[in-house]
Amino acid sequence: MELYQRTIHELHNMLKKGETTSVAITDSVLKRIDAVEGKVKSYITVTADIARAQAEAADKRIKAGDTSSPLLGIPIAIKDNMCTEGIATTCASKILGNFVPPYNATVVAKLKQAGSVLCGKPNMDEFAMGSSTENSGYFITRNPWDLDRIPGGSSGGSAAAVAADECIGSLGSDTGGSIRQPAACCGVVGLKPTYGRVSRFGLVAFASSLDQIGPLTKDVTDTALLMNVIAGHDPKDSTSADIPAPDFTKALKKDMKGLRVGLPKEYFIEGMDPQVDKAVREAVRTLEALGAKVSDVSLPHTKYAVATYYILATSEASSNLARYDGVKYGYRAASPKDLLDMYMRSRDEGFGPEVKRRIMLGTYALSAGYYEAYYKKGQQARTLIKRDFDEAFKTVDLIATPTAPTAAFKIGEKSADPLQMYLSDIFTISVNLAGIPGISLPCGFTAENLPIGLQVLGRNFDEESIIHAAYAYEQATEWHTRKPTL
């Protein structure tokens, strides 16, 4: 088995025993990127020189007897909407094509302190707006399981890089499903933590009340290890929760005795791929065999989630993206006639069609005369969606659902119909509106050999229970061991 194929925990054990070096692991990953990146196109920036220097530094620490950090010397990719000091951070947008941040995002600083190696900045939907990575301002990332299909979005590059073994683990961001949906499409593990569990300082904002950073990994153990590094209070982020983060690896237990799992009828709907329905129900039976008590629950306001999300998220995007005006940083239109012309042309030439669509929707929803009808109504609906989860969690500990209604679709299949595209996140959006944690992990394959994702949701700040359930399921099945052939 090649080094690039291994998990974080396997490589950490090898480094501790002196069976390999960080330089060898990093070279293995960089060679893998050279070999398959032309097909997958998961990276906007590959930081080969930085990675080699960081690997050498990690080896020195290991030689001096410091092996306490499980991420020491491990190549990790960081989605291109998290600030990396001295390294371009583009958000896959032309408007930030020349932006090099002068500081690190908190999660980047934490990974650096843990001794991880930065191997690159993966591609994404522009400003994290999309479900397919087709909205990147640069190129489309392809699904390693079928190069004619999308890898999911907006963290499509991060998920594809993990699935194709072009990194050992990665970080993504999730505003309405952008970690979990690509994890499902690419057959990897993706966790969206509770809102406030992981610092958002240095994450380029899309919708500030919904955005959350989380890991994409090859297995659940690696998810727990990455969470141990990135979770925790950060005074630089006013939305960061001052709640101590536990050791998530203690939740890695193989049985589910005593855990109550709810199945929401609103998530098993018409129009869903029958293969997805079958695989998820089979996964729930496995949870039952592991000792979980399964019962039906109802989340009655689910039908309003997509509409609510696309009012609130676009409103926040309209506000957050007002700063891209061609003045302070980022793209500026050439030879403008006057100040207004510079503003208008910089934004027109710098933003892609999906970002413009969402800015216009949000500006409309916030405009005088419509604020009460749209934005305020959206906030009220959000409260009802959150209340549904609060009620359900009175009788169950976890909720199990499909991650997405279908497996990965063909590139270009939904581009002409934004509404169809928005519906790919129908099972993930409510989780962001409620702020609760959710994980996606592989639970089967379609007849076309495409991965299917099981989503497990938990109470606020109870990532341990979803990691526990995900680990127990993963250990009882073989799905996570399957790899795409590139």
Image (cartoon, rainbow, N blue to C red):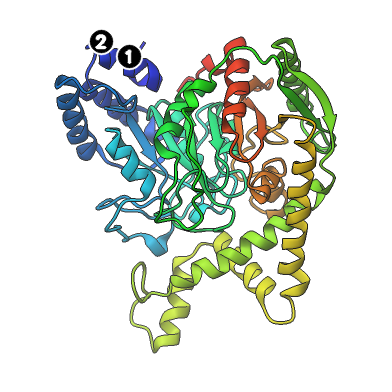
Q: Using the rendered image of the protein, determine whether residue 6 is visible from the camera's viewpoint.
A: no
Residue 166, x across and y down, in percent: 38, 29
Q: Is residue 322 visible?
A: yes
Say which residue label 1 marks.
Answer: 13
Is residue 292 positioned above or below 92 on the image?
above
Question: Which disc number belongs to residue 465?
Answer: none
Q: What residue is pinned by disc 2?
A: 17
Asked which quadrant contains residue 464, the reply is top right
- The answer to whether 243 appears left or right of 403 in the picture is left
Q: Which amino acid, mark 2?
A: Lys
Which residue shows up at 73% across the image and 57% down it? 308
Per the model, the C-alpha gap separating discs 1 and 2 is 6 Å
Quadrant of image for the N terminus: top left
Circle 1 SS class: helix
Question: As shown in the figure, which amino acid type bears the numbered disc 1?
Answer: Asn
Q: Residue at x 44, y 46 (%)?
A: 233
- Quarter of the view holding residue 258: top right
